[in-house]
Image (cartoon, rainbow, N blue to C red):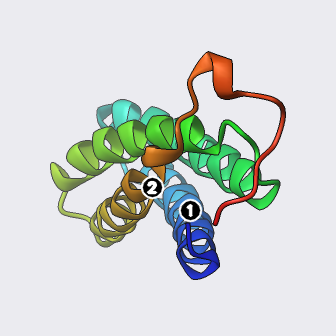
Amino acid sequence: MAHEQHTSCIEACYACADACDRCAMACLAEPDPQQLARCVALTVDCAQACRLASAFMARASAYDGAACAFCTMMCDACAEECERHRTDACLDCARACRRCAGECQAMTEFIPRATDVTGTHAHH
């Protein structure tokens, strides 16, 4: 994997985590945040998945592809939920999630088989 794509994915993960944090706080500030409970829960989970994936990539972990696959799944779910709401924070979050999911999807080709894992690997 080209270093530039790795860097681009890490940046997309951090941007998505930040957008998720902003979305969660904006939802909690709404007059009836209980209606947005699923959105808040997904944004918190998604932000955590993004931070996990970016950390795995930064360390060139043998499991970075698997972390990115999980991140892709979380970003897709979060984007779907956020797109249901018409607030600026939710729509910004959905855009960041879609971008991150696309970047992470490209990284999933590096999911190792159990027999291939010896710790860490370098992306070429």
Tell me what residue is drawn at x 53 percent, y 75 percent. Answer: 5
Residue depicted at x 39% and y 58%? 106
Q: Is residue 64 above or below residue 118?
A: below
**Residue matched to label 2:** 104
Label 1 sits on residue: 13
Single out the residue that lies furthest toward the bottom.
Answer: 4
Q: Is residue 16 above or below residue 85?
A: below
**Dot 2 lies on which element?**
helix
Q: Amino acid at mark 1?
A: Cys
Label 1–label 2 contact, CB within 8 A: yes
Q: Pick the residue in front: 17 or 58.
A: 58
Q: Residue 52 location, x and y as percent?
A: 69, 44
Q: Quadrant of residue 1?
A: bottom right
Residue appearing at x 37%, y 52% in the figure: 105
Q: Nearer the viewer, residue 22 or 45?
A: 45
Residue type beneath disc 2: Cys
